[in-house]
Image: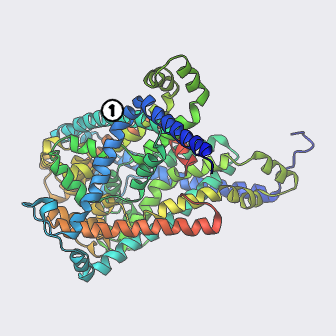
Amino acid sequence: MKKENRIALSRADRTFDIVNYIILTIVLLLVAYPLYFIVIASVSDPVAVYAGKVRLWPVQFTLEGYRRILEYDAFFTGYRNTILYTIIGTAVNVLVTIPGAYALSRKDLAGRNTLMMMVTFTMIFNGGLIPTYLLVLQLNLYDSMWALILPAAVSAWNLIVARTFFQQTIPDELLEAALLDGCSNAQFFVRIVLPLSKSILAVMVLFYAVNHWNSYFNALIYLKSPEKYPLQLVLRNILFENSMGDMVEDASTLAAQQRMGDLIKYGVIMASSLPLLILYPFLQRYFIQGVMIGAVKG
Amino acid sequence: MSSATMATIKQNRRAALCKKARRVLGNWQLYLFLLPTVLYFLVFRYYPMYGLQIAFRNYKASKGIWGSPWVGLKNFERFFATADFWQLLENTLAISVGNLLLSFPVPIILALLLNQMPSKRFKKIVQTVIYAPHFISTVVMVGIIFLFFSPSSGIVNHLIVALGGQPIHFTAEASMFRPLYIGSEIWQSAGWGSILYLAALASINPELHEAAVVDGASKLQRVWHIDIPGILPTVVVMFILNSGKVMAVGFEKAYLMQTSLNISTSEIIATYVYKRGLLKSQFSFSAAVGMFESVVNLVLILSVNFISRKLSDSSLF
């Protein structure tokens, strides 16, 4: 744009920008402060937190909460279980979703519209809790890790996102050329499609892994043995049932126990959410890409 | 029709059939790729739909789903006749419709503001921060609510007292359940929800804005006349999608936020199904309740979709 054509910001536009800055700053603080508060509350003296004296900085810095969490075995078992379920679950998710989505992206696949309708319909109607629960019982999955993994093996939404990606990025000409050269579908998929699809693989791994990391409902209804509980279920017991065992028993009064309990709660919130919150800014672009591919189809 | 043309038609048809067969056989590897996906949907998605007939039977564990006696609509009638029915319906709708109406506009406004933000750096910081709560699990989210809104030690009540008010026992007050539920929902998901609209805004032709600037249009005018009409189709589609979830209020959050004191507003259909079905083993009855919820949902999403297709040409299907 030429310099003389550039129109100076009018008074109205400046007001707009100022109001915009003010609103977004308030939004920023409304979201950031609670997150920040959890961080400082988890390392402050519980008496100060209880009395509302912790506002901007930690008061009487202490790692007591974390020390007690480190001594709590159930938390570690939960952590280990969640890592295991997340790795195996995500591997199953990706191994099923990616080849399936690729096949569904192929225009020459007979029956693909019917299959797509079959997938889409499950997004607006499902059998619900009771029949699914009885099915898991029937399959003898109750109280097994697979009850958390198999019923969630594919997400219809992620399948559609991956399919849209393949449709947009793999040109038909590439396939035709490869088939002419005597390449089979499987060879084409492994040698040509997959190397071009690293970003969708990252998107799928992230979407599915976050889901496994954060899910608790399936564990709540399908797992019976405490030693198999994932992190979120252990967290639930700490946060809501106050089952902290000997973590707080040494405190002299009930009030002191409650204060120590709160400190531990802030600590477990940090310890369980930290991996995601630390990794997320670095992986942000993949998450956003995933949402945007999904947006293309609405 | 001459026999010659008949023969060509037959031949064409046979050729088409052959081509189709070749397409299926030639692509056998693709069907192998699809096999796990199809199996998953049949077993874990469609079989439970078939299993929904338990709602029309009187389930006896010893006889299994298929052997239990058929009772028609008795379970549904029983549910509609319970004293809980209207309360459950009201609670479910209050949370979901309230959530739809209150939280739906927030990501749109955020996206419009972010899109007009002159400083790219500041925009990036705001985005990174407001997306973050999306990654907090439901358990942790509700844990945070309980800590922050605790009557004795929560920061919210410290603030209320500092401003000269009386502390409120948020988590035990039935009237506070809905604001807490919807407010935390907005806090957690509005930022993430804005990504979609930012993508839609980014795809608006920049020449429209340049032309408007030359014509002397202010920013506000450009937001109103270019940005908003530009993202309207996305808004409509998102509204349809969200309205399909009206009855399906997330079980996880409501169940965790439930206390014996706020049960009169926090008991929704999903938590009721869980308690009656899995905790009290009334499988047939609670399957009927769950089915009622799913069917209302289906009808809702189809009708909103129908209305929007008539009114605005934007629709899902």
* Residue A184 position (above or below residue B2): above
| Residue under label 1 | A91
Q: Residue furthest top?
A: A181
| Residue A20 left/right relative to A110 | right
Q: Quadrant of residue B123?
A: top right
Instruction: Tell me the crowding category of disc 1: few under 14, some 14 to 19, or many 20 or more residues within 10 angstroms, Cα based.
Output: some
Quarter of the picture holding the N terminus of chain A: top right
Image coordinates of residue B115 in percent, x first then y, are 66, 49
Q: Quadrant of residue A270?
A: top left
Residue nearer the viewer, A54 or B258: B258
Identify residue type, mark 1: Ala
Q: Residue furthest left?
A: B62
In the image, what residue occupies the spot 6% across and 60% down?
B62
| Residue B98 left/right relative to B204 | left
- What is the chain letter for disc 1? A
In the image, what residue occupies the spot 55% across and 37% down?
A167
In the image, what residue occupies the spot 52% across and 53% down?
B193
| Residue A173 left/right relative to B131 | right
Residue nearer the viewer, B229 or A196: A196
- Number of numbered markers: 1
